[in-house]
Image: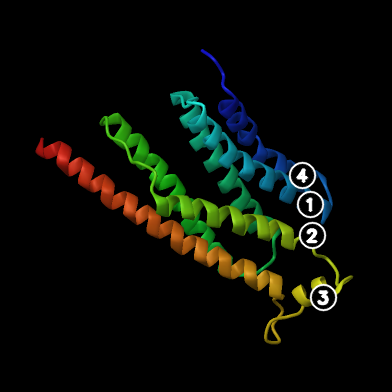
Amino acid sequence: MTITLPTILSIIRLFAGFLILLGFLLLARPEADILAFVIFVSAAITDFIDGYIARKFNLVSELGKILDSIADKILVIMAWVIIITYYEFNSWIILPIGLIIFRELFISGLREYLASKSLSLQVTFIAKLKTTLQMITISLTFFSGIIVDGSSSLTTFLLQPVAGSGTTLVEMACIVLIWLSAIQTIYSGWEYFKTALGLMGTKNDG
């Protein structure tokens, strides 16, 4: 079996989440945040690159598709768990992140069940938007940990409290994006679920 470049990129991305976690366990802040930001953005870029290369040069393989899906789920779920653990925004991020993780695991399980019935869910445009929004949100959240002082006019602006609260402007932006990501993620999951019900109904009718 030939290991293609897209598959290699997926394997590298598979370990990215663990490297980010290792950074938070071993490094002080904001060094851990810097490492997390660099690794996550790089991994997100490889996610788009390996898909493009696979389609462009006809390197799509079953192994590649499986590894790509697993790598994406591990990277994103570990990133969300790290954000809940290490980023002190407020308790309002627990619910949306919990919903995101639940959806990711549920749809993965649903795909496995459909595969056992020789059925499959095609990736939708809404799901691609969901992935992009999550990548942007996680990247911005890691970036927010890098901004530790108001050493410039931009950082001073980003670190000012919102409406007299203890939440800074950059933190509020992250919280809003996290909620938007959750809404988009749940919506795309609902669309997948409806499609799956239709597929199973059609198979049963046949």
Residue at image mark 4: 23
- What residue lies at 30% left-to-right and 36% top-to-bottom? 114
- The three-letter amino acid code for the residue at tag 2 is Ile
Which secondary structure, mark 4?
A: helix
- Is 167 displayed left or right of 127 in the figure? right
Callout 3 touching callout 4 (CB < 8 Å): no
Identify the residue under disc 1.
34
167 w.r.t. 39: above or below: below
User: Which amino acid is tagged 4?
Assistant: Gly
Image x and y of residue 25, in percent: 76, 45
Quick one: 109 or 129, which is closer to the camera?
Answer: 129
Per the image, the residue denoted by label 3 is 156
Q: Element under label 1? A: helix
Residue 45 image position (x, y, % from top left)? 63, 43
Amino acid type assigned to the residue bearing label 1 in the image = Ile
Mark closest to the chain's N terminus, 1 or 3: 1
Query: Which dot marks residue 146?
Result: 2
